[in-house]
């Protein structure tokens, strides 16, 4: 392998995004919706690759139910792998790694539904990581924290391997507020963004060492699958037989050669309506308005309507989300409670 292997972006697009219900639904999850800009989250992810040195056309690993959305919002030259079932990130990445195994490019794995506002900083972090890929390291990108967030996993940084790249000391589960505050004060800890860079071969070797059951199922799914043009459909029975596990649990937490590049790049996983409020432009009263929405004597509200006109009068710190068939109202700061509404809807109708 050369010191500068080509990079093949691998975009994971299998999520359902129900934390942004009722706008995000199983049939059209948040990555295919314009939430932070005129472009959808998926389109913004593709645009983030523009100008990346030595990059090939991307591989998209997506839910088979979203094939039409991928085709509508994608670009020419993409390879699309359609998952017949959701099996978390380790099997999804394994599908792409097997597809890329022969050429053994570096794989830049990233979710399709994140925001990165400082793309040059992201590209610079990738350049810092590239030399380690040739030596078989599995590299993750850690977001330099600016608050004691309890909704993210953390990475404790170890010794510096090269300038701006550290060996991972350990992965830390989502902490409580006290521990998150302590880690922020201590320094040397970053948020786990779920973005990775490694060679296809190094990932498959690590998966073989730590989760051979996943690798065997995914290999069988790819061997028995079909390909038509740039679209690969893994065998449904074989892939569904794979255990469901994340890349962190299956591989990263067990491997010896795991490195982390800390980076500040204006990152958000847009994982809640509160996160979207933080990103949104606001009026003088701190209201973030979208679509047919209005605020009168109101402050600190996120008001979004893709359906009827919504006017909030004399209220503060509310989240009000309206679509053609559902309206969600809850206090700002409590957007994780959307899951209660989704659960209630599923109980009423059988699907979110």
Image: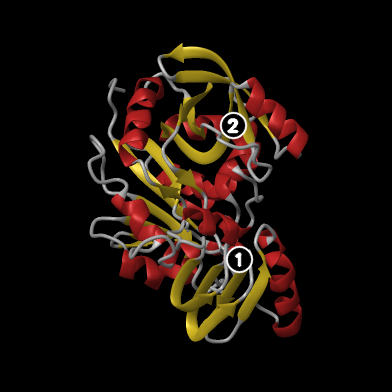
In this rendering, does residue 104 appear at all? no
Q: Kindly check if marks 2 and 1 are in contact, taking CB atoms under 8 A apart as contact.
A: no
Q: Say what secondary structure mark 1 lies in.
A: helix
* 152 horizontally vs 202: left or right: right
Q: Please say which color scheme the image uses.
A: secondary structure
Q: Quadrant of residue 20?
A: bottom right
* 175 horizontally vs 256: left or right: right
* 275 horizontally vs 10: left or right: right
The disc placed on residue 252 is 2
Task: Please tell me whether mark 2 or mark 1 is closer to you in this view.
Answer: 1
Closest to the observer, 147 or 352? 147
Query: Where does residue 279 sit, x and y in percent of width and height?
Result: 47, 54
Quadrant where the C terminus is found in the figure: bottom right
Q: Is residue 161 above or below residue 120?
A: above
Badge 1: few (under 14), some or many (20 or more) residues near its Cα, within 10 Å? Answer: many
The disc placed on residue 58 is none
Q: CA distance from mark 2 to mark 1?
A: 26 Å
Total of numbered circles in the picture?
Answer: 2
Query: Where does residue 6 sit, x and y in percent of width and height?
Result: 27, 33
Q: Is residue 351 above or below residue 255?
A: below
Q: Residue at x 45, y 20 (%)?
A: 165
Q: Residue at x 32, y 30 (%)?
A: 124
Q: Say what secondary structure mark 2 lies in.
A: helix
Closest to the observer, 324 or 53? 324
Task: Give the mark nearer the N terminus: 2 vs 1.
Answer: 1
Closest to the observer, 23 or 180? 180
Residue receiving disc 1: 18
Query: Where does residue 181 sit, x and y in percent of width and height?
Result: 70, 32
Badge 2: few (under 14), some or many (20 or more) residues near its Cα, within 10 Å? Answer: many
Closest to the observer, 88 or 201? 88
Quadrant where the N terminus is found in the figure: top left
Query: Where does residue 293 sit, x and y in percent of width and height?
Result: 48, 78
């Amino acid at each position: 392998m050369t010191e500068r292997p080509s990079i093949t972006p691998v975009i994971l697009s299998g999520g359902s995004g129900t934390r942004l219900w009722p706008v995000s639904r199983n049939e059209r999850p948040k990555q295919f919706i314009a939430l932070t800009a005129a472009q959808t989250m998926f389109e913004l992810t593709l645009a983030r690759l523009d100008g990346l040195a030595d990059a090939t056309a991307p591989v998209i690993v997506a839910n088979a139910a979203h094939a039409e959305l991928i085709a509508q919002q994608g670009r020419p030259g993409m390879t699309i792998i359609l998952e017949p079932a959701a099996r978390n990130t380790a099997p999804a990445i394994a599908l792409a790694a097997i597809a890329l195994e022969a050429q053994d490019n570096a794989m830049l794995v990233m979710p399709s539904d994140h925001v990165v506002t400082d793309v040059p900083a992201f590209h610079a972090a990738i350049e810092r990581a590239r030399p380690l890929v040739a030596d078989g390291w599995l590299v993750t990108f850690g977001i330099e924290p600016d608050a004691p967030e309890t909704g993210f996993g953390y990475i404790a940084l170890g010794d510096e391997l090269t300038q701006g790249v550290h060996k991972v000391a350990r992965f830390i589960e989502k902490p409580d507020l006290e521990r998150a505050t302590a880690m922020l004060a201590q320094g040397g800890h970053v948020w786990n963004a779920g973005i990775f860079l490694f060679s296809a071969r190094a990932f498959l070797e690590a998966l073989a060492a730590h989760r051979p059951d996943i690798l065997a199922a995914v290999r069988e799914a790819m061997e028995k699958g079909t390909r038509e043009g740039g679209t690969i459909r893994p065998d449904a029975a074989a892939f569904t037989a794979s255990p469901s596990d994340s890349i962190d649990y299956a591989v990263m937490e067990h491997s010896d050669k795991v490195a982390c590049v800390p980076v500040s790049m204006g990152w958000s996983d847009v994982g809640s309506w509160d996160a979207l409020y933080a990103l949104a432009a606001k009026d003088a009263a701190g209201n973030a308005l979208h679509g047919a929405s209005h605020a009168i004597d109101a402050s600190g509200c996120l008001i979004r309507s893709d359906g009827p006109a919504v006017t909030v009068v004399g209220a503060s710190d509310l989240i009000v989300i309206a679509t053609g068939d559902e309206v969600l109202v809850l206090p700002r700061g409590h957007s994780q409670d959307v899951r209660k509404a989704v659960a209630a809807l599923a109980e009423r109708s059988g699907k979110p």
